[in-house]
Image (spheres, rainbow, N blue to C red):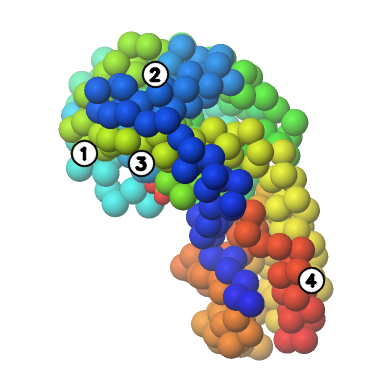
Amino acid sequence: MIINLISDTVTKPTQGMLDAMMSAAVGDDVFKEDPTVNALEEKAAKLFGMESALFFPSGTMTNQTAIKLHTQPGEQLICDKYAHVYNYEGGGVSFNSGVSCRLVDGDRGTMTAAQVESVINPPDFYHSPLSTLVCVENTANKGGGTCWDFQELQKIRKVCDDYKLGYHLDGARLWNAMVEKNETALQYGRLFDTISVCLSKGLGCPVGSLLLGTKEHMHKALRIRKIFGGGMRQSGFLAAAAIYALDNNVDRLAEDHKKAKEIGNVLASKSFIKKVEPIETNIVIFEIDESYMTSDQFVNTLKEKDILIIGMGQGKLRMVTHLDYTDNMHDELLKQLATI
Ligand SMILES: *Cc1c(COP(=O)(O)O)cnc(C)c1O
């Protein structure tokens, strides 16, 4: 039995999901003629109370498309220093949109409205890049699955309105935040101009993300997705997995959160662990006390026990719980950790 805690993207489709995929009605989605993709996009738009949605092959492409929608080359977006759009999208912000990032030194991936306001360049000062977009990430991945305070998100909305900035949510793991904080998709749909969500993480799909926004946004996004090479043909097979996941795999995320907290408690009790970040959802970030062993030694010790985890740099290690991390595996992991 291999226990893979590297990411919540390692899940494989369940039999139920595969059955839904195999019986999907499909068509050519580049001509917008795939009935299952169309049904998914309608379902998601309705769920968030937004006008329109568009299905994408990856979360990176949804974020990159959103950034392109809201900006012109030379402009600047504002995000936390931990943001996925800044750290883990291959420099796409500058490559695809010709935009720079103004980083905020936030708290575990979250920012305050005051911090956002303080880094907006004065629009008439033509020497500096024009600030046109704020990107927030919920949950914040590099912050350790951090959930935002919804009121702070509302305050940032006000700042965006005051300064006429676009407001994009990278909601790759928004499902986790909504389950944990008892929030609704409608709440988020009302607040943001555009939202991206992943289906291929906690929800267990093999492929897929969605971008949500106005009809006009999605009309433009269709062209940008084409330019980025993201037009797919009979993608209804993938959309069927997404519909299945939305119907079956959202509420159960609470189990992943419970397991992550239990792992954190065991880690915190061990003398060789220097620090465990607060655990809010399904991500556990921790540091080894290197006077006992190095991070690499710890990763290798686990690997010998068929337990896979990865480092995030700067001595930080990460474990992520997910759909394929079973109760059995959980018992085994806690037992194994106790023996180290
Ligand atoms: C995973 C992730 C994405 C998108 O990643 P893809 O691998 O391209 O689907 C975007 N933002 C965050 C915060 C993520 O964790």
Disc 2 packing (10 Å; few <14; some 14–19; many ≥20): many
Image coords of residue 110 (percent x, y): 57, 40
Q: Which residue is mark 1?
A: 229
Circles 1 and 2 in contact, beta carbons < 8 Å: no
- Judging from the image, what secondary structure is the residue with disc 4 in? helix
Closer to the N terminus: mark 2 or mark 4? 2
> How far apart are labels 1 and 4 at the CA level?
43 Å
Q: Which residue is mark 2?
A: 165
- In the image, 36 versus 161, the foreground residue is 36
Image coords of residue 294 (percent x, y): 56, 84
Q: Is residue 312 above or below residue 93?
A: below
Number of the front mark, 2 or 3? 3
> How far apart are labels 1 and 2 at the CA level?
28 Å
> How far apart are labels 2 and 4 at the CA level?
48 Å
Q: Which residue is mark 4?
A: 331
Q: Quadrant of residue 221?
A: top left
